[in-house]
Amino acid sequence: MASLFSELKRRNVARVGIAYLVLGWIVLQLGDVLFDMFGTPEWVGKTLAALLLLGFPFACLFAWAFELTPEGVKKTAEVDRSESISHITGRKLDFFIIGALVIALGYFIWERQSNVGPAAEVEAGLDRSIAVLPFVNMSSDQEQEWFVDGLTEEILNALARTPDLLVASRTSSFQYKGKSQDVSTIAAALGVAHILEGSVRRGGDRLRVTAQLIRASDGFHLWSETFDREPKDVIEIQENVAFEIANALKTAMDPEALQRMVSSGTVSVAAYEAYLEGSAYDDQTGASGNVEDWDRALEAYDRAVAADENFALAHWRRALYWETQFTITQLGSELSSLPLQEKVDNYGEAIDAAIANVQNEALGFKFKANKANNEFRFIDAQRYLLTYLQTYPNDTEGQAQLVAIFASTRDSESARLYIQRFLESSLDDPQQINALLNNILFAGFVDEAVYLARNAVQRYPQHVFLHYQSHRALLWAGHTAEAAALIDEIRRSELPAENIRLVQIRQACAEGDRALAEQLLDEALELSERGTSIEFIGLQTMGKPEEAHQLLLDAELDNWALASFLTYPYFDHTYFPEMARILERQAIDRPFISGPPYACKADLVRATE
């Protein structure tokens, strides 16, 4: 046995075997890169690997049976030991092996360095590598297979052009066409962290493409989307759908964006982006005063729900829109021309969908509070909001809604427990500060409202809604000149003309110019599509509370419209027996005042400060 090992060593069999393995590994690695670059079919790589493996024993047998001499290759048995140069050949093989190992080590380090970002990202959940599996043809017409494969290729090519995204080649992905292997197995074989799969159904005048992104490590569906098209131009459809999917994956594969999207309650990029668009229109309305942007916001929220019918926040925003449409004291309540019952029904459908689909139990209490409030269950609404704010104490929207209930029921003592705490929290949403400011004032906390008004105007000098509410708060506290400084900004805004007139009426009455106030009220009523609420507020500002309430009695308003006046501390609910009974059943003792403190004095035509 010892002589056998000695002979193997002398004939360099081991050295040849090691050299062959190292060289074969290098060939396979380079082949893998080149085959991928040129789109070589998968079987070529597999065939090369098989040939190299089969060649190993032949290389060892060759080293045993033959020897390289100065005269060429000879059988080992024909070479005298004294003439053998196997020792010199062995030294050369050693140098060759060392050189090959250096090359292999260098290649290994280069590969690790080039993949260190993705490798680290995999550990952190940030890996941006993906394979696009052939989409499945769900059409009854199997001749559509060419279209489905073409669509898959378009998507793959679009993704391949995305910076920092590693995409498995078509050759690699298409070997799984028609197979039902586990996603994690396919991802492991292709060396990717994500799989994009989908289906195509084409029939009649509709084309439906469904795509979903799956995280291979746990099979979790990060994102899914359905694209409906009219198949008029199949090439354009392929390009458009591919572009939309590639664009969506930028969000779906960005961990921070994905976290925000999932936290909002959807895994549909289209739904999330439509929701963000609607929110932008909402914010834009508050800043500019153009209430027509609320219609654009509703259209965006409708698209969000169409893309993901379980998207609770989109349903919630739709509910808030329809709430404004039967709350006649609300700016923009005239946007929809639908009959009252349809507005109420639309609200009910939206708020019920928000409640049914919300995944965050605490958030659900805010939705339930809103529904209870619009069903005149004020105590239930208050209880729901208090529960919600235990989890989210700094949510300005929830704070504003709670204080609105305190203002409607004139429960200043209960409000006192929360007002200061709310003012000390982070108030970074001007739209919600606007509502909170209004409700704090009407709940009876004038100094606190003035503090918030001054702070808000300083922080958000271009936000016209805040100017509008701040002007009233300053007048209420008697800061007439300070309020007047806000009027020019309000007049230049896109607020409804009748609301601009209301601001001027308040200022005129505060300055004692009753004649100007009356002229402005006439103008406001000519301009307004919300005549009843504008006239009620105008008459109250003119110092005519009896006429104001008689106006509402003559209008024979429904309870939803009447309830919208409850927030005004000068609204006397006792004029309306049904509303009075609603409050009495809940043991709500709602005091009220005779009118705003800046109201015109009946016996003055013009006065000075």
Image (cartoon, grey):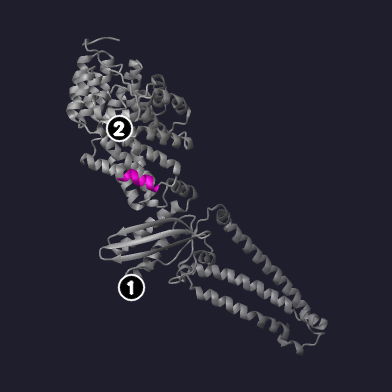
Taking the spot 39% from the left edge, 21% from the top edge, the residue there is 445
Q: Position of residue 228 (x, y in %)?
A: 31, 58
In the image, which disc is placed on residue 142?
Answer: 1
Please say whether residue 604 is one of the residues in the magenta stretch.
no
In the image, which disc is placed on residue 14?
Answer: none
Please provide the residue range marked out in magenta: 349-357
Residue nearer the viewer, 309 or 608: 309
Q: Is residue 437 left or right of residue 52?
A: left
Q: Position of residue 154 (x, y in %)?
A: 39, 63
Label 2: which residue? 289
Quadrant in the picture for residue 21: bottom right
Q: Is residue 475 visible?
A: yes
Element type where label 2 sits in the image = loop
Q: Is residue 598 left or right of residue 74?
A: left
| Rendered position, 89 above or below 557 | below
Q: Position of residue 592 (x, y in %)?
A: 31, 21
